[in-house]
Image (spheres, grey):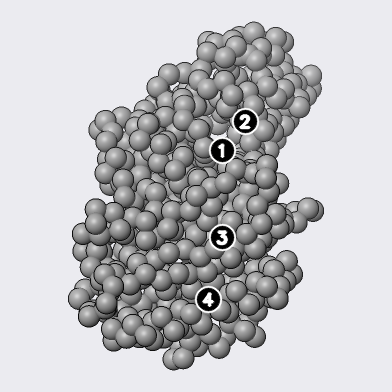
Amino acid sequence: MSFFSSLGGQKGIPAKAPQIRKVQRTITKPAPPPATPAAKARSIGRLPPRPSTSSLTPPHTNSSRSSPATSSTTKRKVDSQDPDRARAIRGGTKRKLTTPPATPLFGSSSDSESDEEEALARDSLSPNKKVKTTNDVVDKNPRRLRDVAHWNGKEETNKKQYKLVHSADFTSENGGKDYTPMFVGSTEDPVSVELYYPGSPRPERFNLAEPRDKQNHNPIADLIETTTSILTHFFPKSISDSYLNESTGLPYLLNRAYKTYDLPLFQSTLSTFNELITTSRVNHTLANHIDSGGLPHTPLPLDLSDRILAQCYSRTVSPHVERLREYESFSDSVYGEILSPFASEIFKATGLTHSSVFLDLGSGVGNVVLQAALEIGCEAHGMEFEANPAGLATKQAEEFRARCRRYGLAPGRVNLMRGNFLKDTHLLHDILPRADVILVNNYAFSSDTNDQLRRLWLDVKDGAKIVSLKSFVPAKWKLEERTSGDITALFKVEKREFWSGSVSWTNREGEWFLHEMDRSRLAAYDLSRRSRARG
């Protein structure tokens, strides 16, 4: 993952216009997310782009994703009408289908194929076929975005309290030797200020200091980007436009004060922001804007989601990022991350809604799981095998809950676990069969691990979507007599492409695969074959 960009010896970095790279695609593909007003205020370096991700297998300097070591021994019962094909599908192990197929998996055999059979075979691999996105999904039960229970700092006695990691907490570590005061000649070393958030009367403490290593957390960049994001998303335009003015707005004044070493201007501008937040929270301006849909509920704007998650990552994962490099080379444990724009594209392509269940197998430090819970509001689960990323995921999840409460937002349920996703009983029996969207970053997984994963898919429900970086369906696979007993026969799969900058291990473009469990395909194939046999 990348962190704050170097300031290049200047106080402030001019905002760059978004550049969209044009590339020929095999299918119609949505353009990358456009730059938002929040991006224009990033004039003094950027927060470390939080790896929005699940771990992948290729080597990477940032997060970790690991993979399980052994296959599941869970017993399953398979359709007894055709024992030979049953053995082929279960791969030699007896397993009980948690979710029985809606139609028989097997039927009578025939040596000939009809036109319908060929159409079904072609449908198994359809790289040029368009699929529905969330624009086609209508959620009958709208998400409630505002965290009413904790709004204005109200706490329920039966709810666990999560301690926020203040920016000042770790900029003060080691006696603050890793940071230098922002303002020359200031009486304090460094100056401390407070920042108020929409959903809580309790502020966050910041030290006005710069990191000696530009890769580390930058309190000033964090503070200015956060104020910009809050002004952009939590207020009606009739209010926010004047505060975001490019020549007189609050972010502009904060940045100018930073560049000119004007401490009084910085403090007074921040005070104006805090007073605006406090007043607007008390008079219900903020609550009314959120509840009326002024802040989109599903999906939450990506730049706002990124801002919140970047704060979580920089306070919990970044200080310990070296731990994520401790993995065995050329193994399933090699770490890599799916970045947030790509994760958001996956959510859209799979039709994920706030009532869905999302599962990330090999979830690393939990980035994609947290993004799904925040951006979509869905129930989100993740399992990671390696100890270091799993431990950091726990810390990041706690910070995520505390920070969401400061913003006054209610994410979906988050469940990050450590374990072997090929063997864990709770995951296999209680979560996998309910999952609507499953992400498995299998880019560097061994063929044996991928084969074991294929057998897990017998337990997913009809209509479940499985996203992977390597396909579980061979490139030239075709549904016919000799292949109809394979788990592959139950999948529809589409090959898609991602933009450069979508993953942590390369800046190149690449492929990803969207699988859908569709047992009706095999039933239709068997029906057609029987008809041919009788005819």
Q: Which residue is mark 1?
A: 415
Whichever of callouts 3 and 2 sits on the residue coming sooner in the sequence is 3
Whichever of callouts 1 and 3 sits on the residue coming sooner in the sequence is 3
Q: Which residue is mark 2?
A: 431
User: Residue 466 location, x and y as percent?
Assistant: 56, 38
Considering only vertical position in the picture, is 272 above or below 85?
A: below
Q: Which residue is mark 3?
A: 406
Q: Nearer the viewer, residue 177 or 3?
A: 177
Task: Judge whether residue 200 can be spotted in this image.
Answer: yes
Give the residue at x 41% y 36%: 391
Relative side of 173 to 535, left or right: left
**Element at label 4:** helix
Nearer to us of marks 3 and 2 is 3
The quadrant where residue 114 appears? top right
Whichever of callouts 4 and 2 sits on the residue coming sooner in the sequence is 4
Give the residue at x 37% y 85%: 264
Nearer to us of marks 1 and 2 is 1
Give the residue at x 31% y 59%: 171
CA distance for labels 1 and 2 = 10 Å
Whichever of callouts 4 and 3 sits on the residue coming sooner in the sequence is 4
